[in-house]
Amino acid sequence: MTQQLEDAWVKDIFTTDELKEYAQFEAQLKERATPESKAQFEQEWYALVEQFKGHLKDDPNSAVGIKLGKKMMDWVNKIYGKEYAHLRSKKFEQGFAKGKGLDQHGLTPAIVEWMDKAIDAYWYDRLYTTLSRVGTLPKEEVAQQWDSVLEEMYGNHAPGKQELVRLAWRDDKVSEEAKAWLAQHYPSLQRDS
């Protein structure tokens, strides 16, 4: 099975079940790909990499970093969707971030490090902005925005979403009002003291 995978090194980071899912993901990707869409996919990827490369001297937590982090996540989520978001994250964190497959994707350790920080800056900006709206917007509107961010981050992967809520409860940058709102929004989760 791994002989057929485009990134064969994923066999070193995925569990057996994840490897099956990844093979299914790649098969679906190939099924819907045309020569034109594949060329566009590669063109978009390398253009993104060049944009990141052009900003390596900038602060990844700046407005430009957040903007590029969003661009990257929009592009990646278009490819992986909600169903395979957990594989996307693991491939980046345990693959690219650890130096696997960089050359074949036009990446270097410096680009991946900056990219990782910019993506984190984008997520933190979205999460803190959404939670700062607790008490100023109707609860339903905040819930819709919050759920949208979590869908983008974790797709259908509930454990990732739950862990993020637990992290928010421990985060000093999150207001007590927002933490109480999270507790109401996730009544089945235990809040750490």
Image (tube, helix red, strand yellow):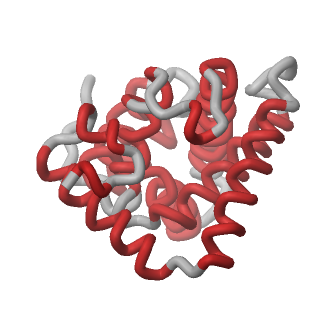
94 lies above or below 185: above
Query: Relative to residue 133, is residue 39 depicted above or below?
Result: below
In the image, 40: left or right of 103? right
The quarter holding residue 125 reads: top right
The quadrant in which the C terminus is found is top left
- Residue 5 spot, x, y in % from top left: 33, 53
Q: Nearer the viewer, residue 32 or 193?
A: 32
Relative depth, front residue between 24 and 155 = 24
Quadrant of the image containing the N terminus: bottom left
* Residue under the point 41% across and 52% down: 6
Q: Residue at x 57, y 56 (%)?
A: 76
Q: Is residue 128 visible?
A: no
Quadrant of the rendered image containing residue 63: top right
Q: Residue at x 66, y 32 (%)?
A: 115
| Residue 148 visible, this orientation | yes
- Up/down of 70 relative to 139, above or below: above
Residue 117 shown left or right of residue 46 in the figure:
left
Whether 105 is drawn above or below 102: the answer is below
Expressed as whole percent of the image width and height from the top left, the position of residue 51 reads 82, 41
Pick the residue in front: 3 or 87.
3
| Residue 169 rendering spot, x and y as whole percentages | 39, 32
Left/right placement of residue 56 relative to residue 82 reads right
Residue 185 x %, y %? 36, 56
